Structure formats: structure tokens, C-alpha cells
Amino acid sequence: MSHIHIPDGILPLWLWVLGYILIGIFFIIEAFYIKKSQKQAKFSLISIMAALMLLTMSIPIPFPVPYHINLSVLTGIILGPTLAFFAIFTSNLLLVFIAHGGITVIGLNTLVIGIEASLGYYAFKFLYKKTDKIFFSAFTATFFALIISTFLTIGIVYAGTHNFSTFSNSHCSNKGVHQEKLSVHNEKHLDNEQIEQQKHNKTEEKFNIKRFLSLMFIFGLIGWILESSLTGFIVSYIKRVKPDILHKFEKEKDIEKIKNENS
């Protein structure tokens, strides 16, 4: 849901470069953390989750707006908020080769979906420790993370397209100022045309934003429920057949129970 499906050349340079810079800094810091904490044993699990995300992201769901399941929160729960970023980056990189977004948005997509995975991880950790309900915790954590990441995605798209529109209008205005010098008649004519064009652009922009938000949240709600339910079922299944994957959550839950009993 929070995947940015934008081809290259649409978002402004400063925005997508910023995404790469932030992700680059994060990877440099986390590379030292992985080496220090000796988490190399989980590299095979990173590959598995990256392949699973690549598969689900490649299958579009027939909604009026583009939608696919990310399973990013599931990735966050299994790998943790740190290693999840590596799986997410790998899947986003491979998706570019099948025309699923542009190269320039890899950094932004990794950032948004990585935040989604991290929020889901911490929300699941909190809820499971408090309620001891595996499906409820996974469902609610996923639903919460998807809402936040959707807002973040909308904010990035709006910041990029709004800035691009402003730049385009400014460029046209500067070009008009140059042409104004030709004659007084052309000056008035161009001014009137530019005022009308700016009004039209503002009206069209506001309409598109409202329409975009409406579609995202109406059909997004269906997608959030679908992905949250799927994540809940998968996490519940993992607990039954491979509980050691969720060992860290079980351990913290037991510690919480001991604290409650002692108090």
C-alpha cells in the first residue's frame, strides 16, 4: 500500500537524493551494528523475506487504485527493525527491473516501507506483551503501521509533485516576464493568461489531492484489513510450527508476566 509507484523524472532531485542519503547513512551505521552483534546468521532469513516481499509486491490486487501486499510488518516482526531494512531494500531494488517504480524512488520506498516495518515490530511487541493474543497483536500492529506509512507516502508524493508544480509555474512566469518586454499589449495579455492559468492549476491541484486522498483511504481500508488479516494468520501459524522465530517476543512476554506476579 505504501509503495511509491512513480517513474523516474517526476520527483524533484532534492527529494529522491535525500532518500538515498538517509538510507545510505542508516546502512553504514547498521553494518557496524550487525558486525558487532554477530547477526550474520540471519542473512539467509533476510534473503527469504526479501524473496517473499518481492513475490507479494509483484502481484497487483484488482482495486480501482494500485494496491499490492507488502508483508513489511511480517518482515519486521521476523527480522527485527534493523535487518528488515536490508530485505526491503533488496526487494525494492529487484522490483525496479520489472518496471515497478523508478530507480530514483528506491531510497524513498526503502525509507517508507522500513518505517512501516519498524512501527509494526514495536507495536506488535507492545501489544503481544500486554494482551498475549498473537493474531490480535499482529493484526492491530499491521493496521496501525499501514495507516502511518500511507500518510507518509502521501506526504512524500505531495511534497514532490507540489514542489515540481511550483517550479514549473515559476519557470513559466519567468518566461512570461521575458516576453512582456515585447509590448504593453502583450504584457497585459500574458498577465491575464497567467492569472487564469494559475487559478486553474490551483483548482485542479486541490481537486486531485482530495480525490487522491479519498481513493487512498476508501480502498486503502480494504487493503489494510486484507494485509493485516494475512499477517495475523501467518504470525499465528509461525507460532505453532516454528515458535523459535518468535522466541524474543515470548521471552519478553514471560518477563512481563513475572513482573506482574511479583507486583
Image (cartoon, rainbow, N blue to C red):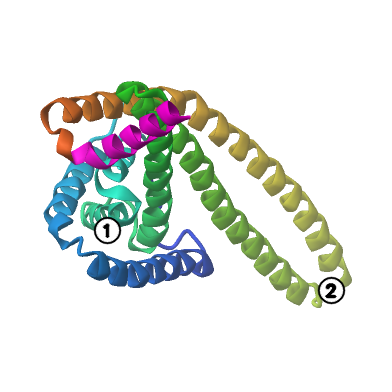
Determine which quarter of the picture holds residue 128: top left
Q: Secondary structure at mark 1?
A: helix
Q: Of label 2 and label 1, which has the lower sequence position?
A: 1
Q: CA distance from mark 2 to mark 1?
A: 60 Å
Q: Which residue has dot 2 on it? A: 183
Q: Amino acid at mark 1?
A: Phe
Q: Amino acid at mark 2?
A: Ser
| Viewer-side label of 2, 1 | 1
Residue 253 magenta-highlighted: yes
Q: Main secondary structure of the magenta part?
A: helix
Residue at left offset 20%, top offset 64%: 38
- Residue stretch in magenta: 245-263
**Furthest residue toward front:** 262
Q: Residue 7, can we see it? A: no
Taking depth in this image into account, of 200 and 97 the one nearest to the observer is 97
Q: Is residue 160 above or below residue 150?
A: below
Q: How many numbered marks appear?
A: 2
Q: Which mark is residue 86?
A: 1
In the rendered image, residue 64, in percent from the top left (x then y), is placed at 40, 27
Residue at left offset 33%, top offset 66%: 30
Q: Is residue 206 above or below residue 90?
A: above
Residue at left offset 47%, top offset 42%: 149
In the rendered image, residue 173, in percent from the top left (x then y), is placed at 72, 66
